[in-house]
Image: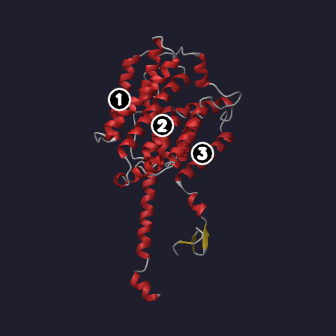
């Protein structure tokens, strides 16, 4: 069978049949994930009872928003070749500090900026340990995952704080007018637009891809690798702390164990969306599609009474698949390239037959 060849018009030809460039691009992993999300939603609307009512859709989006918030900076961090597993504990610590300060009589308008500043500090600690001491981010953030959660327990103990101002609770769990769209989805959408522009339309985004592809090459190109990575850790910690505030308001409860296990859902969604764990590849659109695919799947499983343990199992399986799939695809591509090179005639033979 003849190998595909590139035509001047940007199409691949094989056996006389032209394959348009858009058809090849549509087979990208993030595009496939987006298509799976659309298929899942269509099937759920038509086959799952109560999935399409406004209350459930609002519940689905509201529960997915904490994951989608942290996924924005996490996508950039993973593209740069690093990871932060402490995001759930940072969110829990932020919520615990919020509850503690509220109990002590501080105004909520003062507490929220302090919680965001706390996230900056948490991200800075992670980033300095990785960039200045050269420690692996996986090991560092596993350690801070435990440390930040322990500090949260020391700060708030086993108490639960629920009496936050009603207008803030309404923002955390309320909907826009009579629609199913949560009010908190509006600031998230603004952050999404900013993140898309930064990652895909600025020198910062191009630098992140370059660093993830090859740190040495990026360094020789004049990119300040350590400073860039440090800024991504700080951004991730900041958004995680902001997510902790939203979590406490959305569920009307500040506890030290808020957002426990959130990091698994964030990483699973981001990697499911096609972000390469080794860095250098992926799109923010794919990450968002992966997050909402996972959220919609969990919502459907809850509606059909799938146990919580089974949901965790399925999330873990999807995480493994999302890590393995890009590697398998690369191996297949390399094998095809080697086979094509082996089948090609040597240059001397090509000249002789020409």
Q: Is residue 86 above or below residue 223?
A: above
Q: Residue at x 52, y 49 (%)?
A: 200
**Pointer 2 or 1: first along the chain:** 1
Residue 351 drawn above or below residue 187: below
**Could you tell me which residue is drawn at 52 percent across and 53 percent down?**
29
Q: Position of residue 56 (x, y in %)?
A: 64, 31
Dot 2 falls on a residue whose secondary structure is helix
Work out whether residue 56 or residue 291 is closer to the camera in this orientation and state it. 291
**Circle 2 sits on which residue?**
265
Instruction: Determine which quarter of the picture holds residue 53.
Output: top right
164 over 48 or under it: above or below: above
Q: CA distance from mark 2 to mark 3?
A: 16 Å
Image point (60%, 61%), residue name: 23
Badge 3 marks a residue whose secondary structure is helix
- Per the image, the residue denoted by label 1 is 146
N-terminal-most mark, 1 or 3: 3
Residue 256 in picture, x, y percent from top left = 43, 21
Colouring of the image: secondary structure
Whether residue 318 is visible to the viewer of this picture, yes or no, is no
Name, please, the residue furthest toward the left: 133
Q: Residue furthest front?
A: 222
The residue that mark 3 highlights is 37
The residue lying toward the viewer, choosing from 27 and 84, is 84
Label 1 or label 3, whichever lies nearer to me, is: 1
Q: Residue at x 55, y 42 (%)?
A: 288
* Mark 1 to mark 3 CA distance (whole Å): 33 Å
Q: Position of residue 124 (x, y in %)?
A: 37, 33
Instruction: Report x, y in % for residue 180.
Output: 67, 31
């Amino acid at each position: 069978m003849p190998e595909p060849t590139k035509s001047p018009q940007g199409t691949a030809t094989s056996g006389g049949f032209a394959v348009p460039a858009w058809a090849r691009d549509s087979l990208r992993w993030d595009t496939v994930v987006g298509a799976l999300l659309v298929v899942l939603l269509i099937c759920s609307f038509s086959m799952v009872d109560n999935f399409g009512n406004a209350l459930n859709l609002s519940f689905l989006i509201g529960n997915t928003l904490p994951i989608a918030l942290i996924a924005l900076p996490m996508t950039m961090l993973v593209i740069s070749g690093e990871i932060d597993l402490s995001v759930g504990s940072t969110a829990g610590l932020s919520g615990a500090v919020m509850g503690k300060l509220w109990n002590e009589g501080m105004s909520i308008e003062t507490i929220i900026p302090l919680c965001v500043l706390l996230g900056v500090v948490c991200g800075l600690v992670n980033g300095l340990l990785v960039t200045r001491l050269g420690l692996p981010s996986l090991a560092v953030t596993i350690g801070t995952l435990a440390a930040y959660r322990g500090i949260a327990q020391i700060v708030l103990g086993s108490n639960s704080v629920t009496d936050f101002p009603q207008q803030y609770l309404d923002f955390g769990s309320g909907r826009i007018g009579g629609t199913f769209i949560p009010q908190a989805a509006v600031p998230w959408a603004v952050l999404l637009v900013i993140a898309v522009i930064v990652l895909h339309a600025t020198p910062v985004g191009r630098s992140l891809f370059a660093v993830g592809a090859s740190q040495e090459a990026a360094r020789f190109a004049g990119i300040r690798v350590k400073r860039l990575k440090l800024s991504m850790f700080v951004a991730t910690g900041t958004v995680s702390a902001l997510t902790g505030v939203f979590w406490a308001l959305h569920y009307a409860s500040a506890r030290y164990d808020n957002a426990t296990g959130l990091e698994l859902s964030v990483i699973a969604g981001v990697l499911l969306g096609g972000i390469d764990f080794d860095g250098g590849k992926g799109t923010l659109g794919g990450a968002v599609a992966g997050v909402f695919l996972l959220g919609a799947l969990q919502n459907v499983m809850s509606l059909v009474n799938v146990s919580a343990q089974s949901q965790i199992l399925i999330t873990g399986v999807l995480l493994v698949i999302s890590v393995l799939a890009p590697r398998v695809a690369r191996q297949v591509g390399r094998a095809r390239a080697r086979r094509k090179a082996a089948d090609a005639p040597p240059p001397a033979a090509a000249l002789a037959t020409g």
